[in-house]
Image (cartoon, rainbow, N blue to C red):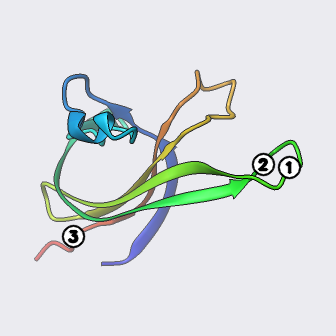
Amino acid sequence: MSEEFISEPIEPLAGTFDTAAMTRGEPGLPGRFKWRNREYTVADVLEAWKETGPCRSGGPERYLRKHWYKIIIEDGSEMTIYFERQPRSKRRNKVRWWLYTISRREKR
């Protein structure tokens, strides 16, 4: 599998979020989402991590910026997606979920 950079928004499908994660103050990873008008189902989570960044007003504090997930989708391909806690894009209606990369399963 070769990794392809995507950096496009995804649309989580309502009612598929991990509500247990939400009770811990984390984003609820969607179990299904749409990308490029196609629906994908999360089969497994391989890895999850967090990204922090400095205070944007110059203070010494560090803030949680993104929640990252490396997932396997139903066809066996791997995707890296992330949730942006404070979306900066005003043009895109404050998109929070993004597809960062995809490694497509090779067909035999």
Q: Is residue 99 left or right of residue 23?
A: right
Residue at image location 37% in from the left, 77% down from the top: 2
**Crowd around label 1: few <14 · some 14–19 · many ≥20 (10 Å):** few
The residue nearer to you, when weighing 1 against 95, is 95
**Crowd around label 3: few <14 · some 14–19 · many ≥20 (10 Å):** some
Tag 3 secondary structure: loop
Residue at image location 32% in from the left, 35% down from the top: 22
The answer to which image quadrant residue 13 occupies is: top left
Dividing the image into 4 quarters, which one contains the C terminus?
bottom left
Give the Cα distance between marks 1 and 2.
5 Å
Give coordinates of residue 73: x percent, y percent: 19, 55
Q: Is residue 98 left or right of residue 107?
A: right
Give coordinates of residue 86: x percent, y percent: 61, 35
Query: Mark 2 belongs to which amino acid?
Result: Cys
Query: Mark 1 belongs to which amino acid?
Result: Gly
Tag 1 secondary structure: loop
Residue 39 makes an appearance in the image: no
Give the Cα distance between marks 2 and 3.
39 Å
Q: Which residue is mark 1?
A: 59
Give coordinates of residue 34: x percent, y percent: 31, 35
Give coordinates of residue 37: x percent, y percent: 32, 32
Are the residues tagged 2 and 3 within 8 Å (C-beta)? Answer: no
Q: Which residue is mark 2?
A: 55
Outermost residue, right side:
58
